Amino acid sequence: MMKTMKSLVACFALGLSLLLVPQEAHAVEFNAYVCSVTFFPGPTIWGNTGAISFHVSTQIGCPTGAPTTLHRLCTSGRTAADCPRDTSYTYTSAALHAVMQILSQAALYQQRVTMETFTTCVGPNTTCVRAISFTR
């Protein structure tokens, strides 16, 4: 009886621990056009070595009145709610500058970008960029 009780307690504890471990949210992928891009030199709340803020639209040319969404690419040391919690999704300074150039070109030439967003961010109830890729 005592062994059975210990087994039940152990199973309950294991089940509870699995429920309490934060799980990474499922990423959502979508295509958009870059409307505007801004670089913020660090340190900022989006990172010690700078950040990028950019607006995207699902409509080519980002026509006036079309809905846009704001996204940020963060670096280490970020504290802003809309930055990824996991440091593997933040950018180095060199990578940030390279992405800035590509985002600027995508805005200028209205090239489509594919983004993955997820909700495992520094703050609750926010969405942050997990990955971004560029279409030629």
Image (cartoon, rainbow, N blue to C red):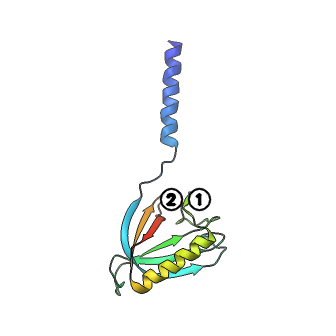
Label 2 Cα neighbours within 10 Å, binned few <14 / some 14-19 / many ≥20: few
Q: Horizontal and vertical percent for residue 102?
A: 49, 78
In the image, is residue 25 above or below residue 16?
A: below
Closer mark to the observer between disc 1 and disc 2: 1
Q: Can residue 97 be seen in this view?
A: yes
Determine the image quadrant of residue 35: bottom left
Residue furthest top as drawn:
1
In the image, is residue 2 above or below residue 46?
A: above
**Residue at 53% from the left image edge and 70% from the top image edge:** 73
Label 1 Cα neighbours within 10 Å, binned few <14 / some 14-19 / many ≥20: few
Quarter the C terminus occupies: bottom left
What type is the residue that disc 1 sits on?
A: Thr
Question: How far separated are the C-alphas under marks 1 and 2?
Answer: 17 Å
Left or right, residue 1 beside residue 109: right
What type is the residue that disc 2 sits on?
A: Pro
**Residue at 54% from the left image edge and 65% from the top image edge:** 83
Determine the image quadrant of residue 123: bottom right
Q: Horizontal and vertical percent for residue 24?
A: 47, 51
| Label 1 secondary element | helix
* Residue at the disc numbered 1: 87
**Residue at 41% from the left image edge and 54% from the top image edge:** 26
- Mark on residue 124? 2
Which is nearer the N-term, disc 1 or disc 2?
1
**Residue at 50% from the left image edge and 21% from the top image edge:** 7
| Label 2 secondary element | loop
Question: How many labels sit on residues?
Answer: 2
Left or right, residue 37 beside residue 49: left
Q: Horizontal and vertical percent for residue 52?
A: 55, 75
